[in-house]
Image: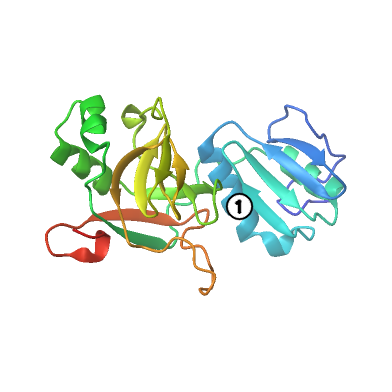
Amino acid sequence: MATGPLGADAGPPRPGTDGPGPRVTPVGEDALLVEVDSAEQVAALYALLTSRRDELPAVTEIVPAARTVLLDGVADRRALAAALTDRPLPEHPPAEGPLVEIPTRYDGADLAEVAALWGVSAEAAVRIHSEAEYRVAFCGFAPGFGYLTGLPARYEVPRRDTPRSSVPAGSVALAGPYTGVYPRSSPGGWQLLGRTTAVLWDLGREPAALLAPGVRVRFRPVTGRDRSGGGP
């Protein structure tokens, strides 16, 4: 029997089934939507597909989300669907990836509230948040906005009951299991921890987005006269 591009037997595809691999559904004329069970599996699948892109039937774009990966512009949906559904995925993404450091001034309007939810002081909350290493799970909401995972589940916090009509660009914030940095001023309901002067989206830069799926992120606290994380 022939072997598929991911090392699986290239039998007939089983779109939408619950086999050992992910659930694959055709979308439109030339796309596949791959559904998995966790953010970790999304990251593992995205890393697998991007690292073996040259071995796959031609794919124009690979777009991860919270529990899915969209493969757009697929040249041979049958072969790729068969390869994906015939083999279980690794549970975790690779440990290594490019690292981006974001200088952050932890003076957000919701820092004290988040610290109270965690049952710690504001200083300890800063330490908890800045000592973690994050990974960009997926991007969305606005150009340059990355959904970062990395905080333990016990530090998840709810969105604000009443969203703000305007959140400043560069705001570092939390909601649910994610950390994010607002690339531009916009309405938002996430809990604000601090701010950074790092530019998340710049059309004059290549690539325009500072953060992309799979990138590792560290937040570096800045204080006093160090203005790299924001104004006074």
Quadrant of the image occupied by residue 198 = bottom left
Secondary structure beneath dot 1 equals helix
Locate residue 164: give its quadrant.
top left
Identify which residue is drawn at 54% across, 47% down: 138
Q: Kindly identify the residue that appears in the image at 68 percent across and 61 percent down.
A: 53
Residue nearest the viewer, comparing 151 with 143: 143
Q: Position of residue 128 (x, y in %)?
A: 23, 40
Q: Nearer the viewer, residue 178 or 92?
A: 178
The residue positioned farthest toward the front in the image shown: 165
113 vs 182: above or below? above
| Residue 1 showing in the rendered view | no
| Amino acid type shown at disc 1 | Leu
Taking the image as shown, residue 183 lies to the left or right of residue 13, namely: left
When asked about the image quadrant of residue 9, the answer is top right
Colour basis: rainbow
Q: Which quadrant does the C terminus fall into?
A: bottom left
Percent x, y of residue 93 = 50, 47
Label 1 environment density (alpha carbons within 10 Å; few <14, some 14–19, many ≥20): some
User: For mark 1, what is the residue?
Assistant: 48
Answer whether residue 63 is visible to the viewer in this image.
yes
